[in-house]
Image (cartoon, rainbow, N blue to C red):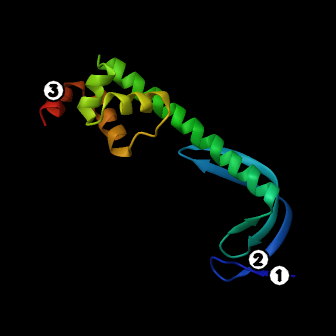
Amino acid sequence: MSRICPQCAAEMKQEEARTEVVNYEGDSLIVSGLSGWFCTACDEALFDDESALRYGAAGDTLIAKSHARQQAEIRRIRKKLGLTQVEAGQLVGVGKIAFSRYERGESQAPGPLVKLLRLVDRHPELVAEVRAA
């Protein structure tokens, strides 16, 4: 029995013990013993239920690690600049509760907010200019 790849329409091959590397923001995990159908042309995968759960769990682990790293970075930058959460929230245009959630990891900080914080981390003299904008 063969399957056609839903991505590129090439033939898929069934495998019982495949190893895949899951990558996210510079970190990676190796997941071995994956079963399912794999495209011979584009590498699309259709995992069986158990393999899909393990592959997804690896991705979830990497995402959680990235979020924890980001929340620590946000807190570190705020403290380095000598700002309260209220002041930091005003600086980046969010309320104290939102900023607190970013630091605690309850919410993911928007990308532009993180970029702004990284910029003022490298150039603290810009804080006054950002406040005035």
Question: In the picture, which quadrant includes the N terminus?
Answer: bottom right
121 lies left or right of 69:
left
106 lies left or right of 132:
right
Q: Residues within 10 Å of mark 2 (few under 14, many from 20)?
A: many
Q: Residues within 10 Å of mark 1 (few under 14, many from 20)?
A: few
Q: Secondary structure at mark 1?
A: loop
What residue sits 40% from the left and 29% below the top? 74
Question: In the picture, which quadrant includes the C terminus?
Answer: top left
**What residue is pinned by disc 1?**
2
Q: Establish if 46 lies above or below 92.
A: below
- Disc 3 from disc 2: Cα separation: 58 Å
Q: Establish if 38 lies above or below 113.
A: below
Disc on the earlier residue, 3 or 1: 1
What residue sits 17% from the left and 30% below the top? 131
**What residue is pinned by disc 2?**
12
The residue under label 3 is which amino acid type?
Answer: Ala
67 lies left or right of 37:
left
The residue under label 2 is which amino acid type?
Answer: Met
- Disc 1 from disc 2: Cα separation: 6 Å
**What residue is pinned by disc 3?**
128
Residue in the foreground of this view, choosing between 98 and 117: 98
Tell me if label 1 and label 2 are in contact, CB under 8 Å: yes
